[in-house]
């Protein structure tokens, strides 16, 4: 195996309404690691974007589809998802799973292969999550982690790593030094791509 030296493009999707919240703080550490590893990073705050729920029209699943029939802020995101080598998805736990902002985004990803066949294949993904309870199972974090794992495995993408931890007040998670280091290391891992 040899390592490619070219810069990787990483797209970060932030699913918390808190701009300096805990899941974003975790994502920022992943970004720091990725940038230290030479990657270029773009962040998208999903909250405040006009991303409508999937309307199940199945237009995106037709053989000659041009993409999602809903004309909203998800449209430019499709191209960014295709152009990126890796994605970081960050979300708080809301009601025992990912936030609604994150779930809307996930549902709309159903249309991604209509823009580029095989768009998920080989895409490298990192997940960052925060929750209020002390336990990842009781908090419901594990439900969301399983959803990401099942969805992206089904779609042919590769989950490179998941970082998650307990915190309440915005940014409080940064006091968990071990977790911060794990997040940074995950960012560095994302910045590399091993070619076979
Ligand atoms: C609407 C709402 C629902 C929540 N539901 C849960 C939950 O089911 N389990 C849990 O452990 N924490 C829950 N929390 C707490 C958040 O997950 C926690 O504060 C997290 O660190 C917030 O992340 P953020 O700062 O990235 O937004 C909830 C918070 C809100 C506002």
Image (tube, rainbow, N blue to C red):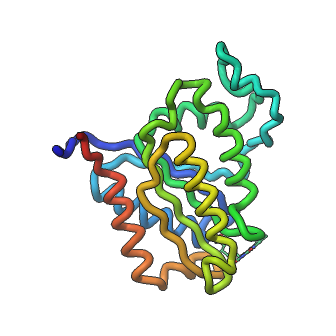
When the figure is inspected, residue 149 is found, relative to residue 56, above or below; the finding is below
Q: Nearer the viewer, residue 54 or 174?
A: 54
Q: Residue furthest left?
A: 2
**Quadrant of the rendered image containing residue 110:** top right
Point out the quarter of the image occupied by ligand 1: bottom right
Residue 41 lies, in percent from the top left, at 42, 48
Judge left or right: residue 48 versus residue 122.
Answer: right
Residue 168 lies, in percent from the top left, at 65, 81
**Who's the residue at 69% across and 72% down the image?**
140
**Quadrant of the rendered image containing residue 170:** bottom right
Quadrant of the drawing holding the N terminus = top left
When the figure is inspected, residue 15 is found, relative to residue 50, above or below; the finding is below
Judge left or right: residue 169 versus residue 38.
Answer: right
**Who's the residue at 70% across and 25% down the image?**
60
Residue 139 lies, in percent from the top left, at 68, 77
Judge left or right: residue 160 versus residue 130.
Answer: left
């Amino acid at each position: 195996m040899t390592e490619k030296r070219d810069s990787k493009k990483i797209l970060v999707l932030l699913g918390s309404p808190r701009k300096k919240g805990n899941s974003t703080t975790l994502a920022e550490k992943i970004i720091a690691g990725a940038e230290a590893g030479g990657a270029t990073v773009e962040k998208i705050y999903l909250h405040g974007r006009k991303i409508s729920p999937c309307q199940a029209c199945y237009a995106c699943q037709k053989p000659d589809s041009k993409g999602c029939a809903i004309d909203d802020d998800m449209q430019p995101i499709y191209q960014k998802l295709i152009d990126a080598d890796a994605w970081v998805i960050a979300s708080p736990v809301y009601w025992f799973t990912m936030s609604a902002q994150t779930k809307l985004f996930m549902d709309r990803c159903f249309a991604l292969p209509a823009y580029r066949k095989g768009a998920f294949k080989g895409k490298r993904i990192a997940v960052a999550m925060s929750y209020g309870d002390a336990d990842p199972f009781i908090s419901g974090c594990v439900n969301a982690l399983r959803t990401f794992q099942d969805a992206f495995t089904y779609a042919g993408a590769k989950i490179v790593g998941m970082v998650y931890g307990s915190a309440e007040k915005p940014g409080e998670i940064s006091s968990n030094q071990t977790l911060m280091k794990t997040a940074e290391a995950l960012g560095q891992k994302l910045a590399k791509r091993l070619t076979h």
